[in-house]
Image (cartoon, rainbow, N blue to C red):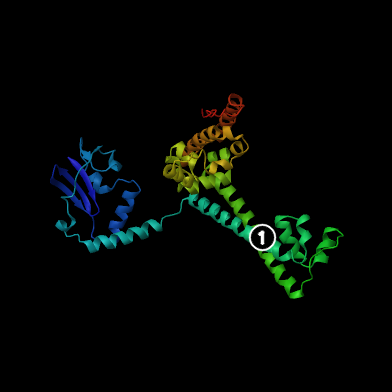
Amino acid sequence: MILVTKWFGVFLCDEQKIKKHVLFDKSPKSIAQKLAAIQKGEILPEELQLAQKRMKVADSRLSKLGKPVVFDSSFIRPEDYSFDADLMHKSMVELGKVRTREPLRPDRCAAQAIRAEDDLIETINIMNERLHEWYGLHFPELGDYVKDEKYALAISENGDRSTILRDLGVEIESVGAELLPEDIEILKKFATSLSDVYRMKEDLERYVEDRMKHVAPNLTTLVGATLGARLISLAGGLKRLSQLPSSTVQLLGAEKAMFLHLRSGKRPPKHGIIFLHPSIHRAPYWMRGKIARALASKASIAAKIDHWQGDFIGDKLLDDLVKRVEEIKEKYPEPPRRPERRRKQ
């Protein structure tokens, strides 16, 4: 006997014959609820009702009820049981509504937050460049005394060149041109907007830090909140990250370089976004690939434990990584020798 579940019911088959069946209620919402439960890996009451000893199942989801096998169930047609295509269409629409209304996983919020932070960084760079170029017409020397957020804050609070110089306690003769009061006023508003973006970025950083400590404590301890959130974002979620092999985790974020390698035969990448980890980007170039491999392996373990809500072993994973990095540094202190080119006779 083989247990088969279709979108309109559950069937117990013997070869190509249907022995028993339980049909779903002909309500799009009811069918959608059943399909949503199936997608989440749950076993339906109708499936338990038809379950027998020593039977087989056509879906690996039902492996607790029997041995999964490949089975052609195309002979079970919905029109034979008065289920038409219009009902299936309505049920699929309802299924979409049911799945989108489900509570969000916390890791999805962390992934969206880190993407928002990246957007703000890009915005800050663009606005900063524009502010420096624009205000530089009036006070080009200001960039020598204040940087980044303080640059925008100085203009936002003071605006006029003489006021900023007095506030900084500096006496210099600027080569900048004079600006009209209305020019200074709009520059102050622009600088205020940039300061607000800086503050929003800081708020997002604190949010990601706090969220990641709850969502993925082991991964956060190992690679930090920001890098951990980027890995989750690139993988498509903590669950997906926990399912990826460490070799894939190592190359997350380097997809373009990998495709270029496959297409043109160029050297394959040794690491992706995990290059941002200090143990990799501070290491000599010939050690980075080995350290990236070790870090990806530990990150994969941390993601699995966090997804399945296991015990906290982040400190141990970090200690093991530090020891492995030291071993690599001791074993490979010098760069590998390049093969000598043969001279043409």
| Residue 239 makes an appearance in the image | no
Residue 105: % across, % down:
46, 50
Q: Relative to residue 274, is residue 31 depicted above or below?
A: below
Return the residue nearer the eye: 129 or 64: 129
At 55% from the left and 56% from the top, the residue drawn is 116
Tell me the amino acid under the disc marked 1. Answer: Glu
On the picture, is 100 further left or further right than 203? Answer: left
Question: Whole-percent x and y of residue 241?
Answer: 46, 43
The local crowd at label 1, few if under 14, some if 14 to 19, many if 20 or more residues have their Cα within 10 Å, is few
Q: Which residue is drawn at 66% across and 63% down?
A: 130
Give the residue at the far right of this rendering: 171
Farthest residue in the top direction? 331
Q: Is residue 25 visible?
A: yes
Residue holding disc 1 = 129
Name the quadrant containing residue 328: top right
Which element carries disc 1, helix, strand or loop?
helix
Give the farthest residue toward the front.
Answer: 345
* Quarter of the N terminus within the rendering: top left
Name the residue nearer the viewer: 212 or 42: 212
- Residue 282, position as x, y percentages in the image: 63, 37
Q: At 73% from the left edge and 59% from the top edge, which residue is drawn? A: 151
| Vertical position of residue 283 compared to residue 234: above or below | above
Q: How many marks?
A: 1
**Which one is in front, 314 or 183?**
183
Q: Residue at x 44, y 41 (%)?
A: 265
Image x and y of residue 136, in percent? 74, 63
